[in-house]
Image: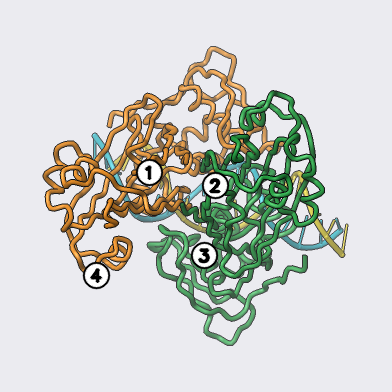
Chain colours: A green, B orange, C cyan, D yellow
Amino acid sequence: MPAARWTGGPVRHVQARRSEGVNKSFRAQPNRSGSMSGFDGLVFRPRSDTPIWQQIYDYLIALIDSGYLQAGSQLPGEIHLAEKLGVTRITLRRALQQLQQEGHLTSRKGVGVFVRSLPLALVVRDGSRFSESLTADGKSVATQTLFLDREPADADMAAQLRLPAGAPVIRLRRVRSADGQPIYSSTKVFPATLLPDFEVVYARRQSVTDVFVAHGIQKYRRVETRISGGFAAADEAQLLQLTLGTPVFRTSSINEDAAGNRIEWARGCWLLTSVDFIF
Amino acid sequence: MPAARWTGGPVRHVQARRSEGVNKSFRAQPNRSGSMSGFDGLVFRPRSDTPIWQQIYDYLIALIDSGYLQAGSQLPGEIHLAEKLGVTRITLRRALQQLQQEGHLTSRKGVGVFVRSLPLALVVRDGSRFSESLTADGKSVATQTLFLDREPADADMAAQLRLPAGAPVIRLRRVRSADGQPIYSSTKVFPATLLPDFEVVYARRQSVTDVFVAHGIQKYRRVETRISGGFAAADEAQLLQLTLGTPVFRTSSINEDAAGNRIEWARGCWLLTSVDFIF
DNA sequence: CAGTGGTCTAGACCACATG
DNA sequence: ATGTGGTCTAGACCACTGG
């Protein structure tokens, strides 16, 4: 990935709107000299009414909101950036930590800190599946299939789909991205015997709806939907390009066909700050 | 509040279950000598495969899960605790920070760090309001009314309730607690002209449903429900006894009477780790 | 190999709450 | 006046990633 590296430069002022509770006005001022070297002229005053790390937080948020720091671009190394901002690395890290937690930044050990954009995906419950009703405000929505296989049902799968233990199921793991930013990972489980041609049909357009239709299932209804909150586990963090422990939504839903057979159990993990569930 | 102070003592081992992604096994071992002085004998080895702060996190989680640290009790001061655990205050704070973020602990500046329990409240959408369908697994559920007044509608209120700007509305702010732990704060707005006797009826049993019934509104329907995620603002943090910036659910919902009048706009703030929304 | 982020230390001053 | 948590500094070593 050819991430543009950000080394500093002129700065536009933009009101920071995100993150309620951390919304004091700037104390940081870009240098007014002709220097293009970055942040050397910034003034962060210690122990004013807003902590330095919060001033830096506000400052970086503004750079992101203004579009000056674009999604995917890399920040300068922590040591350099801290030096330019005139603070300790620890103080800088306090700000970066908050930004990571809120999903604005991601870090990869040994590589660097990167900007994440936060596309807001509206999700409407139309009686079918979440992901199909994902709207993205004109953003490009992409689906990546991680794996698709058949296996015997474990206890949870059997219980949720009302199958005997060990019955064959199809398991599908995918990631949805909006504008190149992964925002949703899902694991879906289907009863294998009801959908013999799953793989063939799915390969054509990566659509589960198509698979249902191909097997004569035109209509199905949402039996139950659960939404809960949690913190990104290792695999979720990797898939969604988040820092470990970032807060996320977790969803679980079950669909039933017209005959009352449970045909899908879906679990999803969503970036907390990127989704609105509307019913 | 007569919070019991925890100064240390014998320790039971319990498997930590919470916080996916931070679930390595213990490296900390309680001292086997007869010492009752607390944590002097604990061994946290630096730079093993799990960071020290995570070992401490796991250790404290276990103490909370085991019931050894009860909700409302106060931890020893950070300096003393750090000394007893044999780490720097900063390292200890890294663990405490994670625990605060997940809602297990709260801190009050100048006072101390306290244990929060995390009651799981199941919320079922029965077509009416969230809070009425709040189940609490045998826990005692209490409602505290913060304020109730009449005022002219601002732009948002007017839009949501489909009222002319400045029309009189009733505003109600409450907090719900389960087992003494606040888990939900709500702000509800009603069109004042439709509910002239609001205050009188509400005073009797603190029930909005009663108010509706008293005004001849037996049935109403949920027009829209929104669930989104965010981070606790200052007032939310105070109400829910959280640390500023803790991740929360935010809900927004609108109810309509049989005639199609919008009679309630409710916004809620929920502790992320304490709620399951089920539809 | 050099550069990155992740972790950890041993101090220090401050604002705040309580007695 | 004392003790608390919140902030900040100036170093250091580590594990990881990439060329």
- Tag 2 and tag 4 share a subunit: no
Is residue A220 shown above or below B177? below
**Callout 2: SS:** strand
Q: Pointers 1 and 3 in contact (CB under 8 A)?
A: no
> Which residue is farthest bottom?
A34
Is residue A271 shown above or below A38? above
The label shown at residue A249 is: 2
The label shown at residue B127 is: 1
Q: Residue B12: x, y in percent?
A: 54, 18
Q: Is any atom of residue B240 visible in this view?
A: no
Q: Chain of mark 1?
A: B
Distance, label 2 to label 4, CA atoms, is 35 Å
Q: Seen in the image, is A168 located left or right of residue B63?
A: right
The label shown at residue A56 is: 3
In this rendering, the label closer to the viewer, 3 or 4: 4
At 46% across and 69% down in the image, what residue appears?
A16
